[in-house]
Image: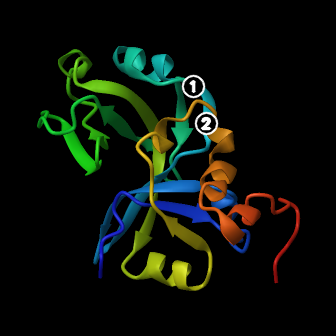
């Protein structure tokens, strides 16, 4: 099995789970035992400053918490974009390129010069062994390459159609699929 860590899962119109309707998920881990990711395009109204005050200065606009997924909504996962991805930084675990997860127990002041921005997710999306692969086979997800800025877009609500449009061809046409049309 080839790891899909660092790739995007883009919900297809055939995906029936309301937790993932028109979502874009960045896979932060994909191993034989399962997969873990965060939904990139579900911003909340809760400011990062209200929950993680010391980290709020590093949060990218919109500087709010995001719904990372339906699993453990009280847990936080923080994505960061490094300024210099080749330098190892304590508390940063690379996912792909300059993007990775950050240990929120580290003093943010120690990371300020190394980080170009963060996004904080409440909860995550998780799949057991073989579950994600089955969902992909059933047509629930497109697996696409991520760009470094995907996790940090200023307008997260536009991410689903934006990722699809940049694929071109028939994939770009899916970006215009009406949200209220059911597929059988």
Label 2 neighbour load within 10 Å: few <14, some 14-19, many 20+: many
Q: Is residue 47 above or below residue 156?
A: above
Q: Provide the secondary structure element on which disc 1 rests.
A: loop
Q: Residue at x 57, y 25 (%)?
A: 62
Q: Position of residue 110 (x, y in %)?
A: 17, 19
Q: Is residue 47 above or below residue 78?
A: above
Label 1 neighbour load within 10 Å: few <14, some 14-19, many 20+: some
**Which of labels 1 and 2 is toward the front?**
1
Name the one closer to the observer, 69 or 100.
Answer: 100
User: From this viewpoint, which residue is outermost toward the front?
Assistant: 169
Q: What colour scheme governs how the chains and residues are painted in the rendered image of this protein?
A: rainbow
Residue 46, label in figure = none
Q: CA distance from mark 1 to mark 2?
A: 8 Å
Q: Is residue 60 above or below residue 163?
A: above
Q: Residue at x 45, y 23 (%)?
A: 51
Q: Provide the secondary structure element on which disc 2 rests.
A: strand
Q: Residue at x 26, y 18 (%)?
A: 112
* Residue assigned mark 1: 62
Q: Position of residue 56 (x, y in %)?
A: 42, 18
Q: Residue at x 52, y 32 (%)?
A: 65
Q: Position of residue 161 (x, y in %)?
A: 69, 52
Residue 43, label in figure = 2
Q: Is residue 106 visible?
A: yes
| Discs 1, 2 touching: Cβ within 8 Å | yes
Q: Which image quadrant: the C terminus?
A: bottom right
Q: Earlier in the sequence, mark 1 or mark 2?
A: 2
């Amino acid at each position: 099995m080839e790891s899909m860590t660092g790739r995007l899962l883009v919900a297809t119109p055939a995906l029936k789970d309301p937790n993932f309707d028109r979502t874009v998920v960045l896979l932060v881990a994909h191993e034989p035992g399962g997969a873990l990711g965060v939904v990139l395009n579900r911003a909340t109204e809760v400011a990062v400053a209200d929950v993680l005050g010391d980290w709020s200065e590093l949060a990218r606009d919109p500087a709010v918490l995001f719904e990372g997924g339906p699993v453990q909504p009280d847990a936080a996962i923080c994505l960061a974009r490094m300024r210099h991805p080749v330098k190892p930084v304590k508390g940063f675990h690379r996912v792909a390129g300059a993007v990775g997860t950050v240990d929120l127990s580290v003093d943010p002041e120690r990371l300020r010069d190394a980080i170009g921005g963060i996004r904080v997710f409440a909860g995550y999306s998780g799949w057991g062994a073989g579950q994600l692969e089955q969902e992909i086979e059933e047509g629930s997800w497109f697996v696409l390459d991520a760009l470094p800025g995907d996790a940090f877009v200023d307008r997260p609500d536009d991410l689903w159609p934006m990722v699809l449009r940049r694929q071109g061809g028939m994939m770009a046409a899916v970006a215009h699929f009406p949200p209220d049309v059911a597929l059988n």
